[in-house]
Amino acid sequence: MKPSDLAAFLDTLVARQVKLSLMIWGPPGIGKSSIVAQTATARKIGFIDLRLSQLAPTDLRGLPVARNGVSRWYPPEFLPRSGAGVLFLDEINLAPPTMQGMAQQLILDRRVGNYVVPPGWFIWAAGNRSEDRAAVFDMPAPLANRFLHLDTQPDLDSFKAYALKAGLHEQIIAFLAFRPNLLHKLDAQQPAWPSPRSWAMASQLHAIRTDVAPAIGAAAAAEFKAFCEVYRDIPDLERVLDGRGAGLPFPEEPSMRYATVVGLTTRAETPERAFHGFKWLTRVASVEWAQLCAADLFRLMRMQRKHRALFRLIEADPELTVWIDQFNALAGAPAA
């Protein structure tokens, strides 16, 4: 399952109020925890990130307090008491078997000791797999059988959608479009290696013009540095986006082409600039490159709620209308 598919699945569970417990599997660094938190934020519900590996069994069950000769368990303050939200048991299989056993009652019965999970709360969990070289414990079969299980894998399109929305550096996005195999490349022998999470950190380092190797490792950083050199030779994108791109050719070298397409997308702050960039590309590049740009450009405009203005500009341009009709015919799709 792609991260974008996971986000859609979680949103559907919240929208339909399906309270089935959920276990999200996947390699480290692909954004499992972030997607869960973003789902809760988007739905305007609470979010509690509970790391069982950092707790003892009494931390979850609470402390016994004598009352009239009978012990009562007082639950911890970090568990929800009311309202709606997501109780997220992150890195659940990093917890030792005793803690997983304690969590089993919480997951199955929605209660532990005297504590009862409020009806408006979802219980979701996440963890890495043993093949990811994570120091995990095997999940007991009775606990595993109480979950829905989703396997999530890194995906470039999902990362690009996140990166465009989050404003990651355009050279990071362009490089990964050119070298998608480096989006996630776990290296158990090195402390730093490429992942969606570490590329987001690398973007912050690159924005202040410092070395990105501490985030993604020396090998990936060397490739990224070489790629950044091509930015000196890409077309003048400001001229293109201002509508003055006539006579500027599309680059021949593949890495420069990726840099140009991503640059047009990330710098198109307005529908007018997006229109000029897309029109220039349809004139100078093949259909495949214009389609690649359109997919990201239209997605970004939708996220910024500027897509209707862009579509009006495209529909009013006879040249682009013909191009879109021809593209639809080639793709076997009906004309809009």
Image: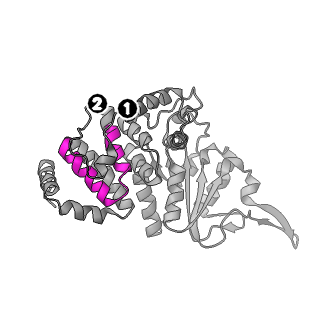
Q: Is residue 251 left or right of residue 329?
A: right
Circle on res. 253: 2
Given the image, on which type of amino acid does mark 1 rest?
Val
**Front position in the image: 146 or 220:** 220
Q: Is residue 156 left or right of residue 198?
A: left
Q: Where are the magenta residues, as a range?
A: 258-285
Query: What residue lies at 73% left-to-right and 64% top-to-bottom?
Result: 77
Q: Quadrant of residue 15?
A: bottom left
In the figure, residue 113 lies in which quadrant? bottom right
Q: Is residue 132 above or below residue 11?
A: above
**Residue at 53% across / 29% down in the picture?**
187
- What amino acid is labelled 2 in the image? Glu
Quarter of the image with the C terminus is bottom left
Residue matched to label 1? 230
User: Quick check: is 57 in the magenta stretch?
Assistant: no
Q: Contact (CB < 8 A) between labels 1 and 2? A: yes
Q: Residue furthest right?
A: 69
Work out how far the residue at label 1 is from the one at label 2, CA to CA, in angstroms.
Answer: 9 Å
Question: Magenta segment: does it hold 281?
Answer: yes
The location of residue 181, given as percent across then percent down, is 40, 33
